[in-house]
Structure formats: structure tokens, C-alpha cells
Image (cartoon, rainbow, N blue to C red):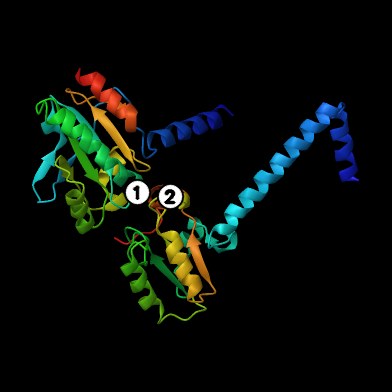
Amino acid sequence: MRRIVCFFLTTLFASHLFAQNTPLEIGQPAPEISLPQPDGTPFSLSSLQGKLVLIDFWATWCAPCVEEQPELKVLYDKYQKANPGKFEIVGVSLDKSKENWVKAIDRFKIDWIQVSDLMFWKSPVAKDYGIEELPFNMLMDEQGTIIAINLHGKELADFISNYVR
Amino acid sequence: MVLLNRWEGIRIFVKTKDDMRYFILLFAAMLMLCSEMRAQQQQEPWNSNQLMEPENLANRINKNQTANLLILTIGPDALIKGSVDMGPAQEAENIDKMKGYLKKVPKDKEVVIYCGCCPFDRCPNVRPAFNLLKEMGFKNAKLLNLRKNIKVDWLDKDYPINE
């Protein structure tokens, strides 16, 4: 009997251990992102240490993500342009079509960092960050630690404003 | 008999006039909610019999039982094994492409479409595509019931994909 219980507990524990999409938590280090930019230049998230970084996971096929881009533009103009060394945005696109991705960058005049492997949901970054749906974002502090997950609209603006003050 | 018992049950709770009024109000509200929900369901171009469960499709693909089935993606990417890419159906040019493609397909062929960007209530692609299938007279049109998205309801389940 004891053996059965033990077996059961072990399988339960193991299945937990191997469960996919372990959600990230505040206080954990943000997993590295190494992906190309639209012109093919490689980018690494770790190169932004020392800055507050908003990592915005989005795609042109995600309507709420697209709607959010003008809001990000406002934040970028306000905090990055005033203080280039302190704040950065990285847009990680889960698009499949490069054409759609580049068109949207032009259309919304996105001048922050954009990266993508153009692998849609198959992108390893989706697994690394345990993303189950878009929009999804994360704020990373100067040491690369996650300090906020999935804040949008006023909550996001307030958080950044309080942080940089 | 069951009905009688139910009424008796209600009579135990409903003793005063106020109770009765409250009960009627509640009942009316529930009735309205129900009919509204039904109306909303009726607005969708598909009915519940036309939804195909992802597990069923995955089984059929794995067992090579897809000879009489056409799988079309009308969303961002043709992830499902053997599916044909029509492009997002919210764009008119992709609807034209789909129309052209379907002209050669017999009307009694089972056609299942999927998008998988997001739940149906937020998806801009499933309705135009399903309406086209209906307009063109496909009697065996199906919509893949990806409740959340293709990541959670297909990829994470290790169902077969186009490599």
C-alpha cells in the first residue's frame, strides 16, 4: 500500500516538474531573448542591463496588441527620449509574416527595438516565457529581474512613472 | 409528478407576497438572460454540431483518416499538419483566394477551418471564412473548436503539425 502511495506521489511530483509553461514570477530573472531585428541584426536582451525594460510580446494578428502600440509610443516618447540611458522597450513579435510585421512597424512609427524569429506560436520564446495568450508583457529592472507582469493601460503607465521618478 | 414536487418546493420558500414578487422578478430575469444567450448563439454563422473538437482532428490526422477531409487555415499560419494556408480571412484578398480554391472542391467534401489566434469572440477571421463556406453551399463545413488559441489547444498537446 505504502509503495502505491509513494509511486503516486512521485509521478505527481515528476509531472509537476516536467509541466510545460511554468509561469514566470516577479523576482525571477527574465530569460534571455536572442532574436534578430527586422534587418537581420542580432539582438540580446542581456545587452540592456542597467535599464528598465518593457518587454512587449505582440503580433499583428492580435488586435488588442496592435491597439496598444500607440500607447507604447506615448510611453516611449515620454520616458526613453527624455532619459535614453534609463528606459527601453523591446517588442517581441509572434508574427509569421515578415511583411505584416514590418508594415505595422512603419504604420505605428515604432522606433523601439523590434525582434522576431517569425515562428508564430512555435517560437521558443513563447515557451521560455510561458506565454499562453497575447497581449503579454513584462517589466525587467536594471539587474534583469522581473518586476511586473502583464500590466496594461493606466496601470502600466503609472508603474513606469513611479519607477523612474 | 416531478413538476408538482418542484412547485411545492418553491411554495415552501415563497410564503409572503414580497417573496412571491421577488421570485417572479428573479424568474423573469433568468428567462431574459437565457433568451439573450440563445440569441447570441444564434447570431454565430455556425452551430454546435459544426464545431470539431481538436482531439478528434488530431486522432484522424494521426491515423491517416483525412482523405475525405480538407483542412484550411484562415488565420496567421498553417500550423496543423496537412492544412492549406488561405491567409487571414479578415482580408478581402484572402477571401477571394479561398473562394478560388474552393471552386474546385466538391460541395459535399468535409471542410474544417481554423484560425487559433484567440477565442472566437475576439477572432476577426472565423466568421467571414465560415460564412463563405455556407454561401458556397458546403454541406459539411466545420470549425475547429480551438477555445483559447492554437498554442494552448493544439501545440501544447503535441498534436501533429507541419514541420
Where is residue B129 drawn, in percent x and y? 43, 65
Report whether B109 appears left or right of B76: right
| SS assignment at label 2 | helix
Q: Is residue A45 left or right of residue B153?
A: left
Up the image or down, A140 lies above or below A19; here it is above
In the picture, residue A1 is in which quadrant?
A: top right
What residue occupies the far top of the structure in this picture?
A165
Which numbered circle lies on residue A63?
A: 1
Residue A121, position as x, y percentages in the image: 31, 50
What's the residue at 88%, 32% (across, down)? Answer: B11
Residue at the image point whose x is 25% and y is 25% from the top = A160
Q: CA distance from mark 1 to mark 2?
A: 8 Å
Q: Is residue A30 above or below residue B29?
A: above
Kind of residue at badge 2: Arg
Query: Is A112 left or right of B145, judged from the image as shown?
Result: left
Where is residue B96 shown, x and y percent of the image? 35, 73
Q: Chain of mark 1?
A: A
Secondary structure found at label 1: helix
Between B47 and A146, the one nearer to me in the picture? B47
- Is the C terminus of chain B in the top left, top right, bottom left or bottom right quadrant? bottom left
Q: Can residue A24 be seen in the rendering of this structure? A: no
Give the residue at x 69% y 40%. B29
Mark 1 Cα shell of 10 Å, populated few (<14), some (14-19), many (≥20): some
Amino acid type, label 1: Ala
Q: Chain of mark 2?
A: B
Asked if marks 1 and 2 touch (Cβ < 8 Å), the reply is yes
Question: Can residue B109 be seen in the rendering of this structure?
Answer: yes
- Going 87% across and 27% down the picture, which residue do you hit? B15
In depth, the one of B45 and A73 nearer the eye is A73
> Where's residue A128, x and y in %?
28, 39
Q: Which mark is residue B46?
A: none
On residue B122, which mark appears? Answer: 2
